[in-house]
Image: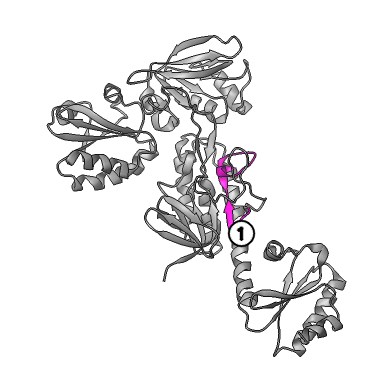
Amino acid sequence: METIYDLLVLGGGPAGLAAAMYGARARMHTAIIEKGRPGGQAATTEELENYPGFGRGTTGPGLTQAMAEHAQSFGAELIKDSIVSLDVKSFPKKVTGKKGEYLGKALVYALGAEPRMLMVPGEGKLRGKGVSYCATCDADLFEELEVAVVGSGDAAIEEAEYLSKFADQVSIIVIHEEGKVDANQVSFERAQQNPKIKWVWNSIVKSVNGDELVESITLKNIQTGEESDYPVNGVFIFIGTVPLTDIFPAEVQLNPQGYIITDEKMATSLEGLFAAGDVRAKYLRQVVTAASDGAIAAVAAEKYVHETELWKNQVIEAKKPVLVAYYNPADMSGTEKIGIVDRFVRANQERFSLVKVDATRNELVGRRYHITPDQLPKLHVFMNGEIKQEVAEINEESLNAIKNM
Amino acid sequence: MIAVNKDNFDNEVLGASGIVMVDWWGPKCERCLELMPHVEDLAPKYPQIKFCSVDTSGNRRLAISQKVLGLPAILFYKDGQKIDELSGQEIAPEDIEAKLKQYVE
């Protein structure tokens, strides 16, 4: 029989690795599907000094490798495959990869984002010929050479700092007016002290030029409109990311930038499908927030799997008609009415079974049957997996009416 | 796979007859390290092709002389002439194999 995982995590960056660690530790049968080495974008950052508890000297590859080992130590499996498509409406959900098919009761989608391209002439042609999106990968090739960094966010400023250890000069091309960057102030101040870093303000890149290797970039000053040729041997582009949502189900809501919209439990608009990390619409994209997303998604997924299975066994597939009593444990008069249902079912136990649901905690009943706290207590009679009758006013008479159903 | 450096590149690659594939990598290039075992697996399947690798750290000038300024990069030579290349982070093992198939035909 084919393996059905409790939790299938798509993507092995910090979000996916944290989700798998939490899932496996909660004894869910968990697997991570990752096409390459785990670590995600964090593995392409050499210096990573803002993950709590891991200060100076921490590296992206080192930290993410530890995260992968941590998840595996609790039993999470690491499957090496490239995901082609998803079928999220079936139960279990199906993930199709290049090498095989995988089944999971819940999915955490954590495929992250990839660097955004400038989309200017020469950029594509000179990729790997001086155009780069990964300082860690390529920095040492630029020893004694001059490079430009495009962008002014955290990644741009911090990677410029790293590049300055190799290149003779690093020019940061910033679209904003002098003194304004998008990066955090600490990194900005450090970069300003760096004698190898040069600032080019009010400027955008119009093209990357060169025959076989990058020779220059054409800059345009957005204040004066003036264009100029700026000689460099390399261009490192850090102008943000684009989410990897190509294979994501079309019916799930994305924001205008293409990031996945979730609630605070990382749940998407489709049941059992969670999203975590950079692929999600969120305020701060950092390793620590990715790991946090992953933890939340795994806990929410575990609750989803538990509730779904319990509901299936006790209500949907029950042989006898089932009285489902929804209640709020904080409401005394409501819980007394549930006592009436309790006595009724005990007196008629050959005909009915009873399932009591704390509807303030159970998410499944809210999602599937739209039970809201203001309706409690409330009773549903289920037969063959479907609601046969709804009882809003619970008393002896309304219960006796069920008997004659 | 033959580890090639600035001292023996001329001999092993430019002086070789037939098809030579060179995998350019660096110890800090995660994608390169990920790709390497796949390339090593391909070597015995294509005995007609000579498989070489260059660690760019310490062979930087050699890399630039071959117009390699980004990793990973897979270059193909025929009788000492560069004839084809793959570069960029998203090189997949399948892309390399497709090229190898093309050159053994």
Q: Give the extent of the magenta segment.
A: A269-288
**Image coordinates for residue B97, horizontal then vertical, percent:** 27, 43
**Can you see residue A171?**
no
As rendered, which of A281 and A336 lies closer to the eye? A281
In the displayed structure image, the side of residue A227 where residue A320 appears, left or right: right
As rendered, which of A363 and A29 lies closer to the eye? A363
The subunit carrying tag 1 is A
**Image coordinates for residue B88, horizontal then vertical, percent:** 37, 33
- Figure disc tally: 1
| As drawn, A326 above or below A194 | below
| As drawn, B21 above or below A214 | below
Q: Is residue A274 magenta?
A: yes
State the residue at coordinates (81%, 84%).
A401
| As drawn, A356 above or below A210 | below
Crowd class of label 1 (few under 14; some 14 to 19; many from 20; radius 10 Å)? some
User: Circle 1 — which element?
Assistant: loop
Name which residue type carries label 1. Glu
| As drawn, A153 above or below A170 | below
Q: Is residue A275 magenta?
A: yes
Residue at which label 1 appears: A271
**Image coordinates for residue A109, horizontal then vertical, percent:** 53, 51
